[in-house]
Amino acid sequence: MDFLALAEQNLVSPIVLSFALGLAAALARSDLSVPEAAAKALSLYLLFAIGFKGGVSVNESGFTPRLAAALLAGTALSAVIPLVAYAILRAVTNVGVVDAAAVAAHYGSISIVTFVAASSSLTSIGMPFEGYMVAVAASMEAPAILTALWLVSRQRPGAPGDTGLWREILLNGSIVLLIGAFGIGWITGPDGRAEITSFIDAPFKGVLCLFLLDMGLVAGRGLRQSARLLAAPLISFGIAMPLIGGSLGALVGLALGLSTGGVAMLITLAASASYIAVPAAMRVALPEANPAIYLTLSLGVTFPFNLTLGIPLYIAAAQALAG
Amino acid sequence: MQTHLAKRVEIIIEAPMQRRLEEALTRAGVSGYSILPVMGGNGASGPWTREGQVGRAGGLVAVICIVRPERKDALLDAAFAVLDRHIGVVSVSDCEVLRAERF
């Protein structure tokens, strides 16, 4: 399928339309809301399901050297992408060192919801991908934070460290659940999947729709409150950076010899920006950084771009490069 | 009913800093406090609401401590060491409590 066909199919999918509904409702100041506890439960379900399925896939294919190489490559990508993002931000926008480093950290890390949406798109068109990409996603959560802190420490030597920060980052609930479910899937394999298939397979897309409805509401409210802070260069960055990060992901995916679906997933991971793990780390480590800038960029600009046009583009690029 | 003078210290702090504040309070000898979620409000950065925040990073919590007057300064020093670079509001007010031995 070419990009236009993929984009057309994606834009009218229930997933994207649910996100659009949430976004429109928030921008129109509707009182529609998803209770916080319900949103948390939906995210727990999605993390468990995607982690479990990845583990089952690795159980079937077995541990390969490519898996280890992909983990190392994902870690390296996450550490390097913030350097590129930081250089671009400092060159083309007027944000300061701390804000630029904080934004860069978000773009080096990943959005697991974008990953889930991409996996759903690939499943829809019958394109398989390596199950261990779930573990690669987990490996890409934290290195970007380290790079961002290093970027700031160059300008502000002797800045106080926080010994508890790394434990919180590495053991944050999303990573623990994703890796834990991956481990359960790996151990139990297809037999385990058969036992809970009615739970993790059938409701998956419906749950994802509800979760993206909530994400649309969150993104819309963020845009309504903070859009005035985003000048044209910053908004351009929010759209260009996924393409730059995704290009790096494509190069790495091809070098690793991943399948077409695997390359598409690595492009998606490299193109996505965090809005859960990294903001929490930034509030602790770089409280001077303005959350309205980094959250609005990652959640209000890059996430909708990736969800609507980015994912079809990354799949089309993977097909052209590795198909 | 016999009551005793005490100090009520209310600290509104970013949710990601909650654990650090609790540890600092414990080190300062403050063994009792309550933590409440903050649902929304208005401040120097404009209106804010818990609704629409992803994860805990954008949240706020209110930590309420009631201590004997002589413990107030140690508590404030501990709180300031955590709050220093962060968003937060600290207020102190007089109050009366029953059962002074509990504070």
Image (cartoon, coloured by chain):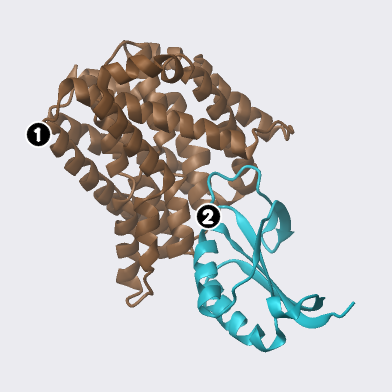
- Report the front residue among A291 and B50: B50
Image disc number at residue A296 = none
Which disc, if any, is residue A291? 2
- Amino acid marked by disc 1: Pro
Q: Chain of mark 1?
A: A
Q: Which residue is mark 1?
A: A65
Q: Can you say whether A205 is above or below A26 in the image? A: above
The reply to whether callout 2 and callout 1 are in contact (CB within 8 Å) is no
Q: Residue at x 49, y 17 (%)?
A: A203
Horizontal side, residue B48 vs residue A205: left or right:
right
Horizontally, residue A32 falls left or right of residue A8, namely right
Residue A129 can be seen, yes or no = no
Say which chain is cyan: B
| Chain A visual colour | brown
Q: Is residue A305 above or below residue B80?
A: above
User: Which residue appears farthest toward the bottom when viewing the image?
Assistant: B70
The residue closer to the viewer here, B99 or A212, is B99
Q: Residue shown at 36%/71% (left/top)? A: A161
- Nearer the observer, B55 or A257: B55
- Per the model, the C-alpha gap separating discs 2 and 1 is 39 Å
Image spot of residue A301 (x, y percent): 49, 38
- 2 or 1: tag closer to the N-terminus: 1
Amino acid type at circle 2 is Pro
